Amino acid sequence: MAMAYQQFYIGVTIKSHHKNARVERKSPKRTQESSGEEKETRSTKKGVTQGMEGSLTLGTRPQGTIKFAKATTDEESASLDKTRNTSRISEQHLNGEIQWGFDVDDLYDQEGGIEFTRDALPTVCFEFVGNPTDPLPLPKRLDLEIASYWSIIPASKKESDWIRTFLNLSIVSGDSQATSYSNLC
């Protein structure tokens, strides 16, 4: 059965409500497009074939032939391997707030949605900067926002029509852009 929706982005925001809060440690770190490592492979193949053929005909008019043949082949190939990250993690922090963005590019994760295990949840350690002799009060609360963004897949089968009817969306055909919506967790 075809899925009627797919997850494409998750946003996580932690607010300290303290402008002088400084991010001391954070996890996960933002990802780059590639690992920065490249592997180059080169191969060369050379071949030489030689042959000789002779024939002799005896009779009233004797004849003889000798043939020599030589063939040389050179083959060279090169490849460059570079690891490219497809699912991106972005991160920014300012004024006591940190935000992570998780682009979901894996098709299986898009269909089923991302599940954060306890070890994979984003973490942050804030340091509250101020005058040591007259420290500022700690914030009374920290806010955590998790937003999950999904897009409606254009219906091509009857199985996925129910969600379009429920959301009062028209059924489109061709290569039109999917409608996006967000549900906050």
Image: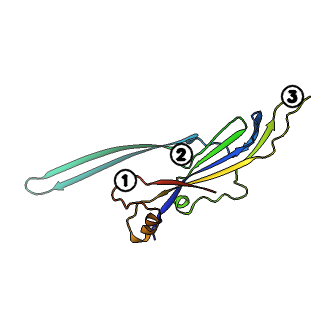
Q: Nearer the viewer, mark 2 or mark 1?
A: 1
- Which disc number belongs to residue 167? none
Q: Residue 10: x percent and y percent?
A: 59, 51
Q: Secondary structure at mark 1?
A: loop
Which residue is disc 2 drawn over? 84
Q: Residue 103: x percent and y percent?
A: 56, 49
**Residue 138: in sight, yes or no?**
yes
Q: Are marks 1 and 3 in contact (CB under 8 Å)?
A: no
Which residue is disc 3 drawn over? 131
Which residue is disc 1 drawn over? 176
Q: Which residue is rendered at x = 73% and y = 37% of the image?
A: 96
Q: Secondary structure at mark 3?
A: loop
The Cα atoms of the two marked residues, 2 and 3, are separated by 45 Å
Which is more N-terminal, label 3 or label 2? 2
Seen from this angle, which residue lies furthest front? 168
Q: Is residue 68 above or below residue 151?
A: above
Q: Nearer the viewer, mark 2 or mark 3?
A: 3
Q: Residue 119: x percent and y percent?
A: 73, 55
Seen from the viewer's position, the closer of residues 89 and 158 is 158
Q: Residue 89: x percent and y percent?
A: 60, 46
Seen from the viewer's position, the closer of residues 7 and 77 is 7
**Residue 106: in sight, yes or no?**
no
Few, some or many C-alpha atoms within 10 Å of disc 1 (few <14, some 14-19, many ≥20)? few
Q: Secondary structure at mark 2?
A: strand
The Cα atoms of the two marked residues, 2 and 1, are separated by 28 Å
When asked about the image quadrant of residue 94, the answer is: top right
Q: Are marks 2 and 1 in contact (CB under 8 Å)?
A: no
Q: Tell me the kind of residue under disc 2.
A: Arg
Q: Tell me the kind of residue under disc 1.
A: Ser
